[in-house]
Amino acid sequence: MSGHSKWATTKHHKAAQDAKKAKTFNKLAREITVSAKAGGPDPEHNSALRNAIVSARSQSMPNDRIKKAIEVAIGNADGANYEEIRYEGYGPGGVAVIVEALTDNRNRTAGDVRSAFTKNGGNLGETNSVSFMFEKIGSIVYPLTVASEDAVFEKAIEAGADNLDTSEGNYEIITTQADFIKVKEALVKQLGNPESGDVIWKPKTNTMINFDQAQSLLRLIDVLEDLDDVQKVFTNFDVSEEDMAKLDA
């Protein structure tokens, strides 16, 4: 089980907060704007934008916010020019950390990310200092109740997926980064909306850490995810089942 998946199970306590939701909408709006600017404002002809809109709606983002984010991209509304930046470093216990950001001010974002690492037991490294320990893939997750494993596997392969992993009460359908949107859209027609679906950095190997190190790491991830410019955080941590239960408590 990847650190990305583990962390997803431990952040539910913040998801309901209004401030967190506002930050989430801001991050989703940036993704929509960047996608629309890169591939055009029509989601019918821009699969990346279409996927960003689906993700926004799955988070109950209002339609007017989605429309405004697209208008920013085509120049009909005031807005900043965002660029994608990746930061890499190490967290407590030597865990590898990848941070993806969309920013209109590289210096501000770099300073905020560096401060988050320094103040929470980590060290910000150079680009490519840890990414070799991950592979960038498409990940589409469905509950086991959606269909039998054989049926899901067959539909996934027909849609163009690379593999299917069954664990933790879920099916995880693996795709290449390039095929992710095509496969996801095909599966939505066959199986309905997934629990989650995104392009992620999946660790090739995990780093085992103890309970105290995991607590410190989760604080670091919390701080990073609270930064306005940060879109996603990925790690390669692993903990024992006993410690995972304590963290979920």
Image (cartoon, rainbow, N blue to C red):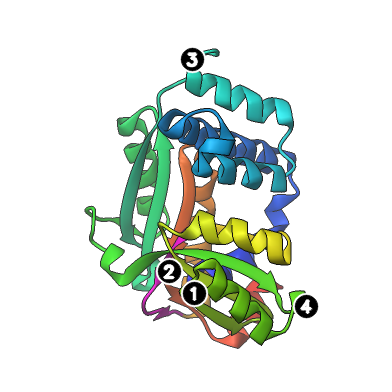
Find disc 4 in the rendering and name its residue.
145
- Give the amino acid type for the residue marked by disc 4 in the picture: Thr
| Residue at image coords 38%, 73% | 93
Find disc 2 in the rendering and name its residue.
202
Real-space Cα separation, disc 2 to disc 3, in angstroms: 36 Å
Q: Are marks 3 and 4 in contact (CB under 8 Å)?
A: no
In the image, 69 versus 221, the foreground residue is 69
- State yes or no: residue 10 in magenta: no
Pinpoint residue 80: horizontal percent, then vertical percent. 44, 21
Real-space Cα separation, disc 4 to disc 2, in angstroms: 24 Å
| Residue at image coords 46%, 43% | 230
Establish if 192 lies above or below 105. below
Left or right, 206 with respect to 239, comes to left
Dot placed on the residue nearer the N-terminal end, 3 or 4? 3
Q: Are marks 1 and 2 in contact (CB under 8 Å)?
A: yes
Query: What secondary structure is marked by label 4?
Result: helix
Query: What secondary structure is marked by label 3?
Result: loop
Real-space Cα separation, disc 4 to disc 1, in angstroms: 22 Å
What is the span of residues highlighted in magenta in the rendered image?
Answer: 199-209
Establish if 34 lies above or below 127. above
Query: What secondary structure is marked by label 2?
Result: strand
In the image, 152 versus 223, the foreground residue is 152
Real-space Cα separation, disc 3 to disc 4, in angstroms: 44 Å
- Give the amino acid type for the residue marked by disc 1 in the picture: Ser
